[in-house]
Amino acid sequence: MRPLFGPAPLLPGFRLALGCALVYLSLLVLLPLSGLAFKASQLTVAEFWAIASGERALASYRVTFGASLLAASINTVFGLIVAWILVRYSFPGKRLIDALVDLPFALPTAVAGITLATLYAGNGWIGRYLEPLGLKIAFAPPGIVVALTFIGLPFVVRTLQPVIEDIEPEVEEAAASLGASRLQTFVRVLWPALLPALVTGFTLAFSRSIGEYGSVIFIAGNMPLISEITPLLIISKLEQYDVVGATALAVVMLIISFVMLFVVNGLQWWAATRHGARAAGGARR
Amino acid sequence: MSDAALRRANAEPRWLRHLLLAVGLGFLFIFLLLPLLAVFTEAFSAGWRAYLRALQDDEARSAVGLTLLVAVLVLPLNVCFGVAAAWAITKFDFRGKSLLITLIDLPFAVSPVVVGLVFLLIFGAQGLFGPWLAANGIKIVFALPAIVLVTMFITLPFVARELIPLMEAQGKEEEEAAVSLGAPGWQMFRRVTLPNIRWGLLYGVILANARAMGEFGAVSVVSGHIRGETNTLPLHVEILYNEYNAVGAFASASVLALLALVTLAAKAIVEWRMRRETRMLTANLAAEQN
Amino acid sequence: MSRFIRQLCAVLALGLSALPVVAEPSLLNVSYDVARDFYKDYNPLFQKHWKAVAGESVELKQSHAGSSKQVRAVADGLEADVVTMNQASDVDFLADKGLVSKDYARRFPNNASPYTSTMVFIVRKGNPRAIRDWPDLVKPGVQVILPHPKNTGNGRYTYLAAWGFALGQPAGNERTAQDFVARLLQNAPLFAAGGRDATTTFMQRKIGDVLVSFESEAELIAREFGKGEFTVVYPSLSILTEFPVAIVNPVVDRKGTRKLAQAYLEYLWSPAGQENAAQNYLRPRSPEMLKKYAEQFPPIRTFTVDEVFGGWSKAFPAHFKDGGSFDQIYQKK
């Protein structure tokens, strides 16, 4: 398989690498997911639509995607700061804190949910300070955002860390010695280098949040129309042994996620190519 | 310019540095440290003895064994896939690239429960291949193979997604130089690419490992929960909790947290040895020059 | 590198050695969440009994998780010899799939349920909100904690208990029952993820005035949080919860374990099995055993799902399927 456009590549291994990747993806992702689509296809279009566009289902998409978007945004902002201080600054306990970043993955999601609910409940370590201020977190929609922020936290940090580590100090030094202020260096030199990783981190945190079930149900309150996430509706269908209905909802979520991810990834590659072309053009001049 | 002067020119103003530190550490304190403390507080709420007793339980031990086994089986495959995918995506141009990346992201967006369900739809007794598997006496669901499969699915994106932005940022000039100097493909990869991507690769493996060991939802659907046989550690945690054994549950959860810390300790050791090697190498070079 | 491979092999060998080498006949009992304590005590009793009558040792394996999830797993190929569930609707599902006999409820005494329990109220120490009966739960300002009524076994029993109570009132009918349940649900600040989660929310997070739960669970709560921390209130009328057991036919036929499985389940009705139930705070069926433990089981008027709702096969679609009475309550708003 030759690249479909552009000059013949200099580097070897394209066929082998792409072949391996495609086989692995097909066996592990495409085949199983097509099983899902197959199952959902047992429904007529009208039945599918009735399940996918019910009042509860629509409300749950809003809750799920809204909370995921918010949580991923929070993670992007704070993840950048955390990754930056973990790579660039030194402070006591840095190694330990670096190690802690993966905690959200290591804790079973149910434990995370139970623990967060306990922390943010009215008598919890955090909730007791927030509740008097009128901020109800646990068992309300904000609780979902908290759980999803926790779940997605490692993504942005861990995606940015190697990229920041990889930025050679000489580049910034050069900028500084040419008289650029720190802000200018950041905007002109660092930001373009960080942006792809930031977008990647955001995308990963976001997509991870959409499907999350285990931690959310313990803190959400699970009230219909208010704090009910789509995965809960899927479970609800499974509890009625309605596998087909469950797969229908799963397919809807999958399609929405796929489109959103595809747009983000497409935009990113478009930006990268444009940026790359500009950089290449600059180098030629 | 001296090193120190360079660093000064190259750093944020002091106030900003302090602000960033405060914000970043505050965020981590609220979102990571407090939950971790809460887990350990619960685990030790009945004292050291109860904690240790909970961990000496046979079922807990077999759950730890199974969890480690699954991670060991899944990670190498994941690394191979991740490197291959990242190589193809970042070093070559081809149509359908964003589609490929999106497909790699997709496993994240699939709810873990649905992941389990999907594998049941294919390999379960009522599934697509179920009758054939049963006729041939092959056991996939409610046994180790299914646990491994769903874990592979769940962790699929990690290494690839960690490497893609990194290799993208690095470009392909170095590799191209190596190849034009006549280095065979494999050698170029080992000598040029691998050293460049080692941190990203390591982070990816660490993440995938933590997630592989911690996964609950998907594994829970396909494991069958057979005590001492197909119970992974996260499942064990949930079961103990539901049985009003909070100490046991949080003790097992703390083991999972500690396992993640062990991988991070491994990272620190690798980092340290690598630095020592580089130092020795530079020292040798200097000695040769003298 | 070779050392790494050796270590890898060692880990693999370790993992494989954890898989059992089957020499003696074995049974897999697939069961619901909180039954573990019961079977942890029951299994050794049966092993001793079987050794005595058949001269054979037997390996007993347990699997516990949410009830409906477990039967789905059995339908998908989890090789259970016997299922021991907390709701007839779950065993009905296996009967529909042809995995257990259609008349499973008549294969063993007492509706194939070796023990029962009922839904009771757990209130804060000293009962400060003076909660005595179901109508106190729908009073404005009272917060009721219960697990998700649509997705969990406990939640469904709570829902049906309240419904049955309202239906049994003078001039009670389906309309008044639905209104009553709707008012009860309005008093729920949240729907917990499961029975255990509801308990944590009530006991540890101190949310709510009353927790509705299984009588047997009150004892587990006492074990973890202390007996003095709460008071158990028995309502005037509640639901009798049954825990049906059944043999999974294709599995025992293939494995040749039918006799063993039959004996395993029958022994639940033996004096030893019944006493074990009582010791785990589950109401034994045997009148003698019930009398012996009368102190821990105060008399309470109960109704069964069969009596009031015509069985789970009717109750489930009417209330908990999509578009059932639970969904209607949330559509009206």
Image (cartoon, coloured by chain):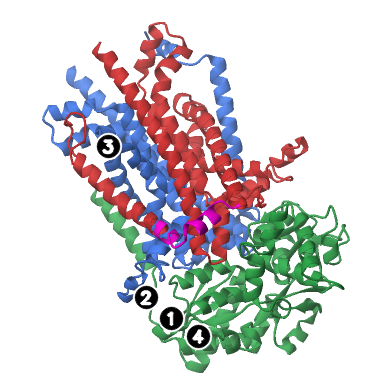
Chain colours: A red, B blue, C green
Q: Chain of mark 1?
A: C
* Residue at x 52% of width, y 79% of height: C95
Nearest the camera: A212 or C222?
A212
The quarter holding residue A237 reads bottom right
Q: Chain of mark 2?
A: C
Marked residue nearer the N-terminal end (1 or 4) = 1
Residues at discs 2 and 3 both on one chain: no
Which label sits on residue C261?
A: 4
Q: Which residue is mark 2?
A: C21
Residue C221 vs A165, above or below: the answer is below
Q: Which residue is mark 3?
A: B95
Which structural element holds mark 3? Answer: loop
Q: Chain of mark 3?
A: B
Please identify the dominant SS of the magenta region: helix
Q: Position of residue C304 (x, y in %)?
A: 72, 78
Identity of the amino acid at label 3? Answer: Arg
Q: CA distance from mark 3 to mark 4?
A: 60 Å
The quarter holding residue B188 reads top left
Which structural element holds mark 2? Answer: loop
Q: Is residue B113 visible?
A: no
Residue range (magenta):
A37-54
Which structural element holds mark 1? Answer: helix
* Residue at x 60% of width, y 72% of height: C35
Q: CA distance from mark 2 to mark 4?
A: 20 Å
**Which quadrant is the C terminus of chain B positioned in?**
top left
Residues at discs 3 and 1 both on one chain: no
Which label sits on residue C251?
A: 1
Look at discs 3 and 4 and give the one toward the viewer: 3
Identity of the amino acid at label 1? Answer: Val
